[in-house]
Image (cartoon, helix red, strand yellow):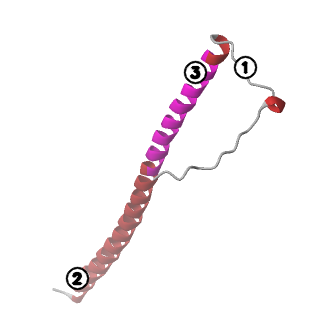
Amino acid sequence: MSRRTVGFWLAALVASALALVDVRNHYLLLFGREQHLTSQKDALHVEWGRLLLEQGTLAAHRRIDRIARHHLDMVMPDPRRIVLLYTQPSNLP
């Protein structure tokens, strides 16, 4: 083989190695980003479940309030008429 051919193959080998390093680096960056987004998705999924539970709880309170007001004719008392009683906790085992 001529010197020129060896030089060409050597340059092609170096270019290929550099391209491989670049592609590998790009892959690792994308993989890290994918892992971050997956954990973010999982956190958002947990938050969504918590919000659904909270919505259900609040809906139940609204329903009870509506029934108390409309069906039982209950109203909130005047704050000046509210009396708070404080008791000492008992020493039960």
Hey, which residue is sitting farthest right in the picture?
80
Q: Give the distance between the C-alpha atoms of the residues marked 2 and 1, in whole angstroms.
A: 96 Å
Hey, which residue is sitting farthest top in the picture?
71
| Along the viewing direction, whichever of 60 and 86 lies nearer the viewer | 86
Hey, which residue is sitting farthest left in the picture?
1
Amino acid type at circle 3 is Arg
Q: Earlier in the sequence, mark 1 or mark 3?
A: 3
Q: Which residue is mark 2?
A: 5
Mark 1 and mark 3 in contact? Answer it, CB < 8 Å. Answer: no
| Along the viewing direction, whichever of 13 and 4 lies nearer the viewer | 13
Indicate which disc residue 63 carries: 3
Q: Quadrant of residue 68?
A: top right
| Residue for point 49% across, 36% down | 53
| Residue for point 30% across, 77% down | 17
Say which element carries label 2: helix
Q: Quadrant of residue 65?
A: top right
